[in-house]
């Protein structure tokens, strides 16, 4: 197989993703208190960025596609934040 | 655009308009999927915050070796899919066929591992319902965890299954039909879907298998 | 009548158009023509409208007498559930987007079809499959949960065919998602040369925003109903408090869809009104940009307010305050629109043709509906008014007074374009006035009833409420006649109506530049847009010039 830049990029990405997988499993066995979950989700977010950038080639897509993706996450954020405004404050006196 | 001489559907002016429309449509579909899975993630978060200890106890009963292996399988399959998209763009027929079928095979491997995992869990009475058994004091709230677990991984597995079928069909079409090789949009869209399903799993994995593993 | 002597007599030999492009059943059921699919939807939702209307008629008859007696309490529960489910999911949500939207979006933007014509047909089949499942649930014995399917009642206790009903809504929901996706891509990618975003008809802006809501909210409904169904099927679940579940999670998810769904119903109507007002005032619309931005902001704000349906649930009072404040904010873009429409009327050359009567009806009724919504958004007031007839009256002013008026206005406005025929104008005016009068007589008394404390969803009531209930039932009878009239004269016009000509209203917009009914590919020559929308001033100058040259 001739090693084009794309090939290297995909292999590097796959390697980085597997590395992050190992990291997230390892981190789970260290007691970080509430930061265990935060660390795990941060690593997931990092993996997502790698997949979006290198596999889904988000940078080469048109801006309208960035907006479509951002809209999906934005409205998920709205659902999450406002529903949590109930669940988290229900016990407050 | 070099491909503007390609055949296109009558409602479009040219092939590049058709390609842009199809790609945009797929991304909108993925935005829909974010909300679809998002509702389940919301439910998970609400109950994990309400019953943290039960969720931690339940999570320690999940089979991490299976989960981690499956994560690796899906991540590698995403890479093979990215290579397949590259092959489609370069019109390399053999490479495209092999890479698509390899991706589909990895998808099948994922589903098999998942199936064995489900079977183990069912035999350990972790399937919510009448036969569910879990150590007190967490029994009922652990059932909630496993309900969410089976639901979310089940819906995800359904997406993987759909992906495997479509990718396998594309693999055979790439091998058999010339028309399929002329237009690489279909493989590109399939790739987007497959990577998205991968992203969902990337979030499911720590939320299911890694809750308070250290204690 | 709208035919003017100036127009040339129409040839009786029909030109090739989308209606005579194939006459077989197959040419309709397998069509990918957006115009024909629009008509398929029109026929189907009309059917559902009369099914849902029949349930409403039974309820109003039951409520003639305080002690009821016409139907059993159990049947009454099934009637209001059937009315709600059918009207919301199988009439109001599809109404303008799928009928007028399908017909008009490609025409208005100068395209030959939507971006994905086959997906468009699939949407209709999903809608029909979902509708069949819902109708089956009704025929097989009905559902008594109310259209909101609140858990744990729906998931644990309710008898009846909850699963079939939920499956129907679930399937139709995917049709909605596909339609929304199709419209978004079409509007982005297939506009005619020169048709920039701020030259789009405002109807397109509202359909675009509606599509966004369909695409973003419907998946949440789908998963919510799935969760409810799984809980019902397997007795496992996350909404059952007996098992540590939280019924409010269901309500949050349900209203995350169902509140924006209100905007799915009302926004396209606002779009129709934004087309009608300039045309029948012969003026450019006032504040085009403001209306366009207000449309988008209503769509976004619509997602932020769902908790106002849950003020008297055990929702956190702090969340209640947030939702209350946000609910008040929605009134700002809505008011901007109402002010812009009235400002468009100012000093216009207004004619009172049928579509315009509906537009006036819309503005008045929507304003009442919107303002009473503010009463309900106020936390303390809602404690008194929640689950009373005040709420019923409020949302019927929005959904019937608003959405249905807009749909009928649009139907009358574009009927000549859709069918190539003119309907009987005086009958149409009579129907519009009848509907307006009947509607107000039906629902205004319900505001008073609700304020006095009459709860919704009961088949019996205290005797002192009877006078107002009789008024409401009388109004409903008038309303029923009003709705049957268009069915008669519109069908009549198909055969006996005068040919309409390409542009009977002298309206601007690309859809009026092609023949009526339009040819299969919409335009004989691909249109190019060179002017702003609603350019009625330029059009008036052009018309008078033409007249002079004729003289």
Image (cartoon, helix red, strand yellow):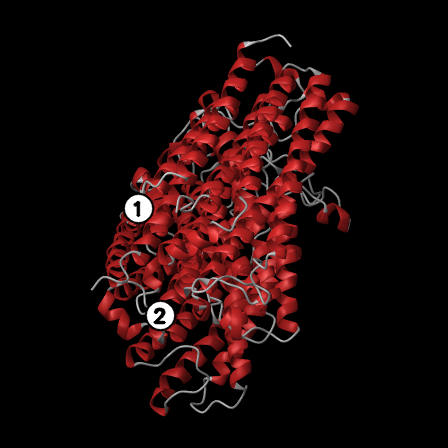
Which chain's residue wears label 1?
C
**Cα distance in 3D space between marks 2 and 1:** 31 Å
> In the rendered image, which residue does mark 2 sit on?
C391
Q: Is residue C257 positioned above or below B23 on the image?
A: below
* Mark before the other along the chain sequence, 2 or 1: 1
- x%, y% of residue B163? 64, 37
The residue that appears at 60% across and 51% down in the rendered structure is: C421
Depth order, front residue of C40/B106:
B106
Depth order, front residue of B35/A87:
A87
SS for callout 1: helix
Q: Is residue B111 visible?
A: yes
Tags 2 and 1 on a common chain: yes
- x%, y% of residue C64? 45, 86
Q: Is residue C450 left or right of residue A26?
A: left
> In the rendered image, which residue does mark 1 sit on?
C344
Depth order, front residue of C129/B45:
B45
Q: Is residue C458 left or right of residue B103?
A: left
Kindly indicate the quadrant of the structure image that contains residue C43: bottom right
The residue that appears at 40% across and 83% down in the rendered structure is: C469
Number of callouts: 2
Q: Is residue A28 positioned above or below C381 on the image?
A: above
SS for callout 2: helix
- Label 2 neighbour load within 10 Å: few <14, some 14-19, many 20+: many
Q: Is residue B101 left or right of residue C384?
A: right
The residue that appears at 60% across and 18% down in the rendered structure is: B86
Q: Is residue B73 positioned above or below B66 on the image?
A: above
- x%, y% of residue A67? 41, 32
């Amino acid at each position: 197989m001739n090693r084009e830049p794309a090939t290297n990029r995909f292999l590097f990405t796959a390697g980085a993703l597997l590395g992050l997988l190992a990291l997230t499993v390892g981190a789970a066995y260290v007691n970080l208190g509430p930061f265990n979950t935060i660390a795990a989700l941060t690593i997931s977010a990092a993996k997502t960025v790698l997949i979006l950038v290198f596999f889904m080639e988000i940078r080469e897509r048109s801006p309208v596609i960035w907006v479509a993706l951002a809209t999906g996450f934005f409205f998920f954020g709205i659902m999450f934040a406002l529903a949590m405004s109930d669940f988290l404050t229900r016990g407050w006196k | 655009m070099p491909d503007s001489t390609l055949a296109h559907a009558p409602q479009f002016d040219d092939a590049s308009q058709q390609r842009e429309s199809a790609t945009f449509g797929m991304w909108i579909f993925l935005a829909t999927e974010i909300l679809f899975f998002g509702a389940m993630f919301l439910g998970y978060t609400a109950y994990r915050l309400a019953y943290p200890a039960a969720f931690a106890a339940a999570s320690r009963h999940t089979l991490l070796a299976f989960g981690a292996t499956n994560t690796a399988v899906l991540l590698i399959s995403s890479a093979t899919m990215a290579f397949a998209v590259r092959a489609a763009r370069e019109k390399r027929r053999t490479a495209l066929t092999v890479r698509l079928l390899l991706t589909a095979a990895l998808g099948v491997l994922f589903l098999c591992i998942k199936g064995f995992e489900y079977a183990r869990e069912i035999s350990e009475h972790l399937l919510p319902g009448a036969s569910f058994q879990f150590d007190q004091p967490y029994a009922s709230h652990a059932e909630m965890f496993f309900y969410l677990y089976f639901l979310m991984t089940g819906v995800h597995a359904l997406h993987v299954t759909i992906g495997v079928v479509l990718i396998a069909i594309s693999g055979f079409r790439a091998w058999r039909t010339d028309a399929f090789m002329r237009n690489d949009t279909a493989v590109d869209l399939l790739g987007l879907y497959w990577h998205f399903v991968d992203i969902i799993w990337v979030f499911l994995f720590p939320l299911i298998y890694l809750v308070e593993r250290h204690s | 009548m709208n035919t003017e002597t100036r127009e040339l007599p129409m040839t009786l030999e029909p030109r090739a158009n989308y209606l005579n492009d194939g006459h077989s059943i197959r040419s309709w059921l397998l069509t990918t023509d957006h115009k024909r699919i629009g008509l398929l939807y029109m026929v189907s939702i009309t059917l559902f409208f009369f099914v849902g209307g029949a349930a409403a008629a039974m309820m109003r008859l039951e409520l003639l007498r305080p002690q009821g007696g016409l139907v059993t309490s159990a049947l009454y529960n099934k009637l209001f559930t059937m009315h709600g489910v059918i009207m919301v999911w199988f009439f109001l949500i599809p109404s303008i987007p799928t009928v007028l939207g399908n017909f008009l979006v490609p025409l208005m933007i100068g395209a030959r079809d939507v971006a994905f014509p086959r997906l468009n047909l699939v949407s209709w089949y999903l809608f029909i499959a979902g509708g069949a499942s819902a109708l089956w649930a009704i025929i097989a014995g009905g559902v008594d949960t109310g259209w909101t399917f609140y858990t744990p009642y729906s998931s644990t206790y309710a008898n009846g065919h909850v699963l079939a009903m939920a499956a129907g809504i679930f399937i139709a929901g995917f049709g909605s998602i596909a339609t929304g996706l199709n419209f978004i891509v079409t509007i982005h990618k297939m506009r005619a040369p020169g048709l920039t975003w701020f030259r789009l008809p405002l109807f397109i802006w509202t359909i675009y925003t509606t599509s966004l809501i369909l695409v973003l909210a419907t998946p949440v409904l789908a998963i919510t109903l799935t969760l409810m169904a799984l809980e019902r099927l397997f007795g496992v679940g996350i909404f059952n408090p007996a098992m540590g579940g939280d019924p409010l999670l269901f309500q949050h998810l349900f209203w995350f869809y169902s509140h924006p769904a209100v905007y799915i119903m009302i926004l396209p109507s606002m779009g129709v009104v934004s087309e009608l007002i300039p045309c029948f005032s012969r003026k450019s619309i006032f504040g085009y940009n403001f209306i366009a931005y207000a449309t988008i902001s209503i769509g976004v704000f619509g997602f932020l307010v769902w908790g106002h349906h849950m003020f008297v649930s055990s929702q956190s009072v702090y969340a209640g305050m947030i939702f209350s404040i946000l609910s008040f904010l929605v009134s700002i873009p809505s008011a901007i629109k109402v002010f812009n429409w009235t400002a468009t009327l100012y000093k216009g050359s207004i004619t009172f043709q049928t579509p315009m009567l509906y537009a006036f009806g819309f503005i008045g009724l929507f304003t009442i509906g919107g303002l009473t919504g503010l009463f309900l958004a106020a936390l303390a007031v809602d404690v008194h008014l929640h689950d009373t007839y005040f709420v019923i009256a409020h949302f019927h002013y929005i959904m019937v007074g608003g959405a249905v008026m807009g749909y009928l206005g649009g139907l009358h406005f574009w009927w000549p374009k859709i069918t190539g025929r003119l309907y009987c104008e005086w009958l149409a005016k009579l129907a519009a006035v009848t509907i307006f009068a009947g509607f107000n007589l039906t629902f205004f008394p319900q505001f008073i009833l609700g304020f006095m404390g009459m709860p919704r969803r009961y088949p019996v009531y205290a005797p002192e409420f009877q006078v107002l209930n009789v008024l409401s039932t009388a109004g409903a009878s008038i309303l029923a006649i009003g709705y049957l009239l268009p069915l008669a004269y519109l069908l009549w016009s198909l055969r006996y109506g005068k040919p309409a000509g390409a542009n009977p209203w002298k309206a601007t917009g690309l859809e009026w530049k092609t023949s009526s009914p339009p040819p299969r590919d919409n335009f004989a020559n691909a249109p190019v847009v060179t002017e702003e929308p609603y350019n009625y001033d330029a059009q008036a100058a052009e018309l008078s010039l033409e007249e002079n040259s004729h003289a």
